[in-house]
Image (spheres, grey):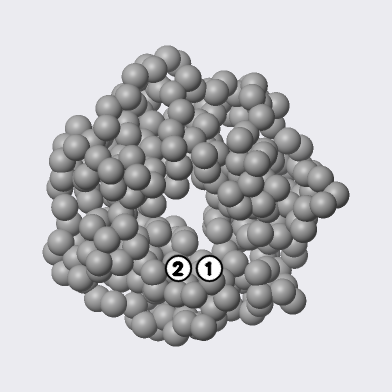
Amino acid sequence: MANDYSIFIGTIGQGLNISSDSGETWTKIRNPIPTEGNIRALRTYPGDPHRILAGSDGLGLFRSEDNGLSWENVESPFADLQVWSVAVDPANTDTIFAGTRPEGFRSRDGGKSWQKLDMGVNMECPIGTPRTTNIIVDPRDSRTVWAGIEVDGVYKSLDGGDNWIHLPDLGPDPFHGDIHGMALRTGDNPAFYCTSPFGIATSNDEGESWDYHYFPKFSEADARSYCRGMVIKADDPGTMFVGNGDFIPGVTGAIQVTRDGGQTWEKANLPQEPNSVVYWLANNPEIPNVIAAASLFGYVYISEDGGETWSKLRKEFGEIRALTLTPN
C-alpha cells in the first residue's frame, strides 16, 4: 500500500505538515498558513477527500481543493478565535460548521458568509472560556447537528444549528462532560460516543442517557485513565479506536481498540511506547484499512491493515493537535 495516501499533521508552533507518500517525506506549508502557526482542526469533505479544511489559532479557516498542494484563506468573522473543530454537511457540502472558543459559526454558502451559533454554552466552565472540540452533522438527517464542549457536555440542534439543546449530563463529575472526541455510529444499531478524561461514554438513545467505560489506569497513582480522540472504522462500525493516556499531556499513552462495538477493549500493540497521551486519530472511507494516530508530543503511528499491526513513522513533530488522511 506504500505511497498511495497522504498524511496531514496540524501542530502547535510548526504549522501544517503534509506527506504525500505515506509518511516517507514531508513538506511544511508556507503560504498562506504560517510555518510557525497553530493548526488545531483538519477535516476532509465527505465524498471529496482532496478538499480539506484546516482550522487555526487566530487566523481563521484555510481550504485546499487539490489534496494539500495549495491553500486559500476562507474569510470569516472568527479569524481572531481558536478553531478547535470543523464539520461539513454530507448532504450539502456548502454548509460548513466551525467550532471555536467559544461556541461556533455556520456557513451555508461554502464559507462566503457566516452566522454565529447561539448555543447557550456555560461560559463559567472550570477551564475558562469553553471550546467546541467536536461538531458532527448527522448523516441520517443533516438538520441534526451534534457539538461537544470542553467542559460543558453535549449540545444538539434539530434545525441545522439555529437552536440548541443541552443534553443530559454524561456523569456526576463536571469532567465527565469534558468532551474530547465524538463519533456517531449509524445503521441498524445506532450509537453516539464521546471521550473525556474519564473514558468513553456511549448513548444508545440519541444522547438522552449515557453509559461510561473506564479504561485501566497506567499506574495506581493516576487519578484516572485519560481519553482524547476516537474514530469508528469507516467500513466496520463495530471497530473503534480511542486515544488513551495517563493524563494530559502525560508521559505515556495507548491506542485502545474494540472489534465488537465497545463490549471488549484491548491495547494496540505499538512498536514504541507513546511519549504522551495519544491525542488524535484519523481514518478515511476511501482507504478504510489505513488508521493514523498521533501522540500529543509528536509520535505518529500508522496501521495499513485495519489496526492489526502498527508502525511508527521516523519523522517526529513537536506538539500535534490535528490529523487527517486522504487517498492520493
Residue at image coords 40%, 58%: 85
Residue 90 appears in which quarter of the rendering?
bottom left
**Pointer 1 local density, CA inside 10 Å: few below 14, some 14–19, many at least 20:** many
Quadrant housing the N terminus: top left
Question: As shown in the figure, which amino acid type bears the numbered disc 2?
Answer: Arg
Give percent across and percent down for residue 204: 68, 64
**Whether residue 286 is visible:** no
Quadrant housing the C terminus: top left
* Mark 1 vs mark 2, CA separation in Å: 5 Å
Give percent across and percent down for residue 27: 27, 27
Q: Nearer the viewer, residue 114 or 62?
A: 62
Question: As shown in the figure, which amino acid type bears the numbered disc 1?
Answer: Glu
Residue at image coords 52%, 27%: 302
How many numbered circles are shown?
2
Classify 75 as above or below 32.
below
Classify 172 as above or below 45.
below
Give percent across and percent down for residue 310: 60, 23
Q: Nearer the viewer, residue 221 or 231?
A: 221
Q: Residues at badges 1 and 2 in contact (C-beta under 8 Å)?
A: yes
Q: Secondary structure at mark 1?
A: strand
Residue at image coords 21%, 45%: 33
Report whether 128 appears left or right of 269. Answer: left
Mark earlier in primary sequence (1, 2): 2
Report whether 89 appears left or right of 146. Answer: left
**Pointer 2 local density, CA inside 10 Å: few below 14, some 14–19, many at least 20:** many
Residue 243 appears in which quarter of the rendering?
top right
Residue at image coords 52%, 39%: 297
Q: Which residue carries the number 1 mark? A: 150
Q: Residue most toward the top?
A: 2
Q: Which mark is residue 131?
A: 2
Q: Nearer the viewer, residue 202 or 86?
A: 86
**Whether residue 2 is visible:** yes
